[in-house]
Amino acid sequence: MTASVIDGKATAATIRQEVARAVERLKAEAGLTPGLAVVLVGEDPASSIYVRNKNKQTVEAGMASFEHKLDEGTSEADLLALIDRLNADPAVNGILVQLPLPKQIDSAKVLAAIDPAKDVDGFHVVNAGRLATGQDALVPCTPLGCVILAKQTLGDLSGLEAVVVGRSNIVGKPVAQLLLQENCTVTIAHSRTKDLAATCRRADILIAAVGRPEMIKGDWVKPGATVIDVGINRIEGEGGKGKIVGDVAYDEAAAVAGHITPVPGGVGPMTIACLLRNTVTAAARQNGLSSPF
Ligand code: NDP
């Protein structure tokens, strides 16, 4: 068996089109242009690329993009003052602080300072709590992207066995919550899990969010399973050139799975698309409207 490839790039493009249509409607019917503020502290090259892409795609979807680039040496107090201003600015519906932040700044304190209604990354404890208790939340973008891909591939997820490898607050835990909401039977595995291979083999839906290159082997995958690989790992490729691989040994897993996401081109492109979606949801809710999605 060879798995069919889940095309995250194409799905992300479709979501961006849906977002652009929703933005047009909000402009026409409510006089509202959703706005996203992205804050970047320092010059981290990977973060700079992400921020540039976020701004570009925000503008392409018809939204307002506010870019705040601060020096590497910015103090925590100055960053918190900027967050206060963005919280109070009615043109800003979503606030994203690009992580990681420099050492002198306590990330938890900064994330806690963002108005939960504008927390389009979904990292604030209020949004984590709302997600866990089944209330309207702003849901973290990468987990949302994973579940959109799973539903698009499998339809109704009710009753399926889902195994999530990884329990971080930004990927593992929220993706598990979303799968539970979809009525999956969810197992969360982590570095202390005994017999990880056997646990993974139970999965109809296997989500890998570990950060270890190609750790999940082909014989850990149940035949026909849907494999969603969140991992982004840079390794040395042929001729000393850098290469990006996921947490799943792709070729081995694709020989067994029913459906699989590639890296790159799977979960990765879904993250910004879901960020744009969250910004529109936040703008609608802040103006007394329900989410168009
Ligand atoms: P973290 O490092 O925060 O969490 C990793 C998790 O994996 C932890 O829960 C850890 O367990 C678990 N783990 C580590 N080693 C093992 C092991 N040997 N066996 C089982 N479990 C293990 O990572 P993130 O959740 O932030 O990210 C995971 C991956 O996803 C990374 O590759 C990251 O680059 C990628 N990523 C991709 C995004 C995108 O596509 N846009 C967005 C965010 C992340 P424990 O808790 O016990 O330590």
Image (spheres, helix red, strand yellow):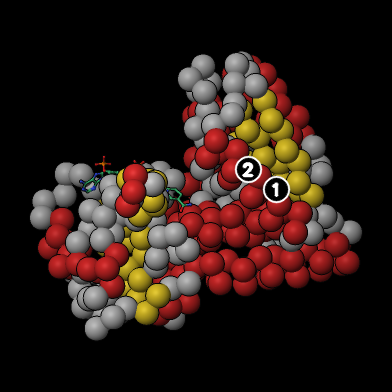
Residue 190 shows up from this direction: yes
Quadrant position of residue 196: bottom left
Q: Are marks 2 and 1 in contact (CB under 8 Å)?
A: yes
Residue 134 appears left or right of 29: left
Along the line of sight, the residue nearer the viewer: 173 or 67? 67
Q: Residue at x 35, y 71 (%)?
A: 260
Quadrant position of residue 20: bottom right
Residue 184 shows up from this direction: no
Q: Residue at x 28, y 50 (%)?
A: 213
User: What kind of element bears circle 2?
Assistant: helix
From the Cβ of disc 2, is ligand 1 less than 8 Å away?
no
The quadrant in which the N terminus is found is bottom left
Along the line of sight, the residue nearer the viewer: 72 or 168? 72
| Residue situated furthest front in the rendering | 239
Q: Measured from the top left, where is residue 205 in percent x and y? A: 31, 69
Q: CA distance from mark 2 to mark 1?
A: 6 Å
Quadrant position of residue 90: top right
User: What kind of element bears circle 1?
Assistant: helix
The residue that disc 1 covers is 55
Q: Measured from the top left, where is residue 114 in percent x and y? A: 62, 35
Along the line of sight, the residue nearer the viewer: 255 or 90? 255
Would you place residue 73 above or below residue 109 in this image? above
The residue that disc 2 covers is 51
Amino acid carrying label 2: it is Val
